[in-house]
Amino acid sequence: MTRSPPYALPLMLACLLLAGCNTPGPGFRGIDPQRVSIGKSTFDVRVDPLGARAQAIRVNPEWAPRRQSVEQRAVAAIEQVSGCRVAHLDGDQVVLVARLACASARARKAPRSSPADASQPLEYDCKLAPQGEGRARMTCTPLN
């Protein structure tokens, strides 16, 4: 009988755990994400069919990001995809869930549904300019 090396089990467990890193929460399963890059962060953003909530999952590696800096970029990504203002945000540096405030259903952007659009992720180059008192101005330029 052959024995597997001592690192085989931890390696296998790590692979299984990492396989679920980009799995949406229960309210967002089955919704195709739109990938948006804001500054140093790239998010998969899903908006629920009613347009009341959205989820942003950061999919790129960042070394020890502060929640505050990731939160600002996640809000920009969610607002860009949903066309609505973020009224409330919960989560951590990786998964953030927003409650949306839309002026009307008509004001909300229709999600991209054609296969041609879905294969082309949204990408933006965004610059943050601190304005003082915890505020910042973000300017984004579409890359595609």
Image (cartoon, rainbow, N blue to C red):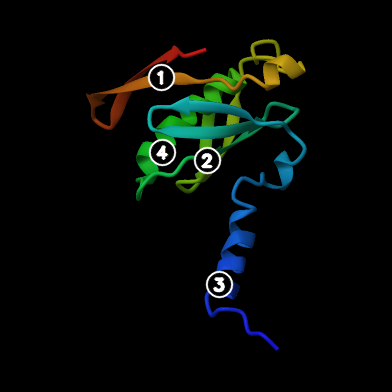
Q: Residues within 10 Å of mark 3 (few under 14, many from 20)?
A: few
Q: Earlier in the sequence, mark 2 or mark 3?
A: 3
Picture quarter with the N terminus: bottom right
Work out whether 134 lies above or below 81.
Answer: below
Mark 3–mark 4 Cα distance, whole angstroms, equals: 30 Å
Residue type marked 1: Asp
Q: Disc 3 or 4, which lies upstream in sequence?
A: 3
Residue 73 on image: x %, y %: 43, 31
Please give the residue where the numbered disc 1 appears in the rendered image. 125
Of badges 1 and 3, the one in the foreground is 3
Check contact, mark 2 vs mark 1: CB within 8 A.
no
* Comparing labels 4 and 2, the label whose residue is closer to the camera: 2
- Residue 59's tag is 2
Residue, disc 4:
70
- Please name the residue that numbered disc 3 is placed on: 10
Disc 1 element: strand
The span from disc 2 to disc 1 (Cα, nearest Å) is 16 Å
Mark 2, secondary structure of its residue: loop
* First in sequence: mark 1 vs mark 3: 3
